[in-house]
Amino acid sequence: MLKVRPDSGKLPDVVLDVLERLGEKFGTTKTSTDHRMLPPCISVIQGDGVDIESMEMILKAMSDKKWAASNISFGSGGALLQKLHRDTQKCAFKCSLATIDGKDVNVFKDPITDKGKQSKKGRLELDCVDGKFTTCTEGKKATNNVLVEVFRSGELLIDDTFDAIKKRAELF
């Protein structure tokens, strides 16, 4: 099963664009109501900006363009809750470096629809100078790196107590 998740973009346009591209690449069949269906092993999942109003808008736009609703599923992100999510909080965890065949390769996200979502790349360090934090990217060295390795290859290296974490947080 291939679930294609479009990146950020204007709804419902980004969903319709992905459906059209998948339809061109993999073909479609028709339902009994004359709507287009992707092959059963391919579908779209939309999570960005999903709330009840956007779901209705996307499904209506799909119907208008003769796409069957069963081509899509919806994720339940922060928009279904308090409208607080990784974008409003400017916080997300992403891979920034991979080692492939012994060689380090920068990994990053650079969406064409929202440059504000561009991620940091390369080996990261977190510098703390006079209580001010700065992320050092692409292998640049921090003066006072405060990052600590906690996990490696599934092994827990540090098993802090909650009290120790709270005490450390008070330092900043």
Image (cartoon, rainbow, N blue to C red):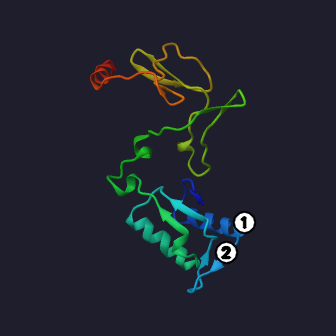
> Residue 97, percent across and down?
61, 32
Q: Hey, what amino acid is under mark 1?
A: Lys
Q: Which residue is mark 2?
A: 28
Q: Which quarter shows the N terminus? A: bottom right
Residue 130 in percent (x, y) is at: 40, 14
Q: Quadrant of residue 25?
A: bottom right
Image spot of residue 144 (x, y percent): 48, 13
Q: Is residue 58 above or below residue 1?
A: below
Q: Which residue is mark 1?
A: 25
Viewer-proximal residue, 143 or 102? 102
Q: Nearer the viewer, residue 59 or 114?
A: 59
Total numbered labels: 2
Q: Which residue is drawn at the image coordinates 55% and 76% (left, top)?
A: 68
Residue 78, x across and y down, in percent: 38, 52
Seen at 44% across and 65% down, the residue is: 54
Q: Residue furthest left?
A: 163
Q: Residues within 10 Å of mark 2 (few under 14, many from 20)?
A: some
